[in-house]
Amino acid sequence: MSQRGITGRVVAQFDAPEGRTRLAHLACVAPLKVAKPFPRPDGSLHICLMDVSPGLLAGDFYDLQWHLESGAHALITHQGFMRVHPSNNAPTTHHQTISVANGALLEYEAAPILLYKDAALRAQTTIAVEQGGTLILSEIICSGRTGHSESFAFDSYQGHLQATYNNELVAWNSTDLRPQLHNLLARGMWDGNTHWATILIIAQNADKALLEALRAELRTIESNAPENNPLRGGVGLFPHAVTITLLGQRAYDLEQAAQRLRTQAQQTLKSHTHS
């Protein structure tokens, strides 16, 4: 049985005509909206994405478009989790388009995806970073409401990400999670964990020095994690891109770890620029 849901949309464009980033254009379709922007001391702009609904219901479609013009620097955060409700009869859809121009920087902390029992989500992210632009993106997937014994009770998650730098492919990922068909707790999968985070850094000087700095920070995070909530991860290097994967038991722990790694990435990239 098919079911048609609602369509939520956000289209945002940032520019920096006088060295300070502003929200040049914003269009929202409920239930999505953006809170009042917060200017930051360094001239960048912080915006918070909000969803005034209970979450994605069967058949819903969300479309997010973020565009940064040359010189803009934006931080995008979230109000809370992106809750995906039972939708196995009519999968929910989440599309995202990101473009970052030369000299622009986007820090994007996406809302953790919380997959309820029988949830079915189709997610697609398309990223285009121009030469000289920088993107630091983090995402978290939660296997369910662990306090309600809903770990891996969702129907399916299908995610596709494609990213280019200067019109060349630098990152491509296709994920198909189906707990009924795959043992997601097995080694080589989630390895007994319930939460999975990914961080993607795309930049002109995403190189071995950045890889080593992030690897050292990750080892510190792992060694300081409590024994009852360990964190495990790995770092990979590609032309103009670094990826980090983290596994853990709580979204909060992964959010804190991701924040530290994003900060380390930005500091290392900035030191490269000034060296």
Image: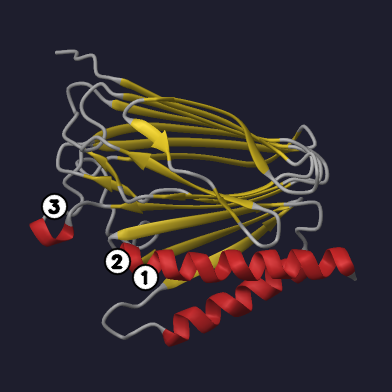
Horizontal arrangement in the rendering, residue 199 relative to residue 158 (left or right): right
- Residue 70, image x, y percentages: 79, 39
For label 3, the crowd category at 10 Å Cα-Cα, with few meaning under 14, some 14 to 19 and many 20 or more, is some
Amino acid under label 1?
Asp
Q: Between disc 2 and disc 3, whose residue precedes?
A: 3
Horizontal arrangement in the rendering, residue 128 relative to residue 62 (left or right): right
Dot 1: element: helix
- Residue 119, image x, y percentages: 21, 36
Do tag 2 and tag 1 residues touch (Cβ < 8 Å)? yes
Q: Nearer the viewer, mark 3 or mark 1?
A: 1
Q: Which mark is residue 250?
A: 2
For label 2, the crowd category at 10 Å Cα-Cα, with few meaning under 14, some 14 to 19 and many 20 or more, is some
Q: Which residue is mark 1?
A: 253
- Residue 103, image x, y percentages: 80, 46
Image quadrant assignment for residue 154? top left
Compare residues 173 and 226 and report the one nearer the observer: 226
Q: Between disc 3 and disc 1, whose residue precedes?
A: 3
Amino acid under label 3?
Glu
Query: Separation of disc 2 and disc 3 at Cα?
Result: 14 Å
Image quadrant assignment for residue 219? bottom right
Q: Which residue is mark 3?
A: 150
Q: Residue furthest left?
A: 148
Quarter of the figure that contains the C terminus: bottom right
Quarter of the figure that contains the N terminus: top left
